[in-house]
Image (tube, helix red, strand yellow):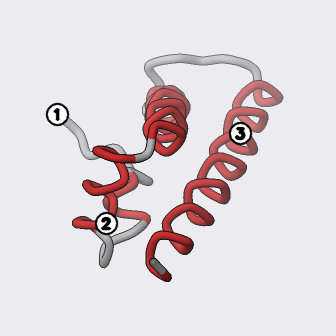
Amino acid sequence: MSHTPHELADEFPNDHALLHELKLNNHHFVTLSERYHEVNGEIHRIESGIETPSDEYAETLKKKRLALIDEIAAIVAGARKG
């Protein structure tokens, strides 16, 4: 199995415990995390040549992933502050 780049654990390497805590206690974070995982997986399949959609669709997915990671990062930053 190949490594999927941009997993949340890779994006937040110093926050593994915090990510786990958020998954247990923050429903909105869980929803965003699941959406991020789905979009990221689809991007990985495209970049691996498994799926071949239009370039426009691939760019739309990448923008969606960026928006999700921005929202997730805001939640993580807020949780760090306590």
Q: Describe the element under mark 2 as helix, strand or loop.
A: helix
- Which residue sits at x=76%, y=25%? 57
Residue type, numbered disc 2: Leu
Q: What's the amino acid at mark 1?
A: Met
Labels 2, 3: front one: 2
The residue sitting at the bottom extreme is 81
Q: Residues within 10 Å of mark 3 (few under 14, many from 20)?
A: some
Disc 2/disc 1 C-alpha distance (Å): 27 Å
**Depth check, front residue: 68 or 80:** 80
Figure label count:
3
Which residue matches tag 3? 64
Q: Position of residue 24 (x, y in %)?
A: 28, 44
Q: Residue at x 52, y 17 (%)?
A: 51
Relative to 55, 80 lies left or right: left
Residues at circles 2 and 3 in contact by the CB criterion of under 8 Å: no
Circle 1 is placed at which residue position? Answer: 1
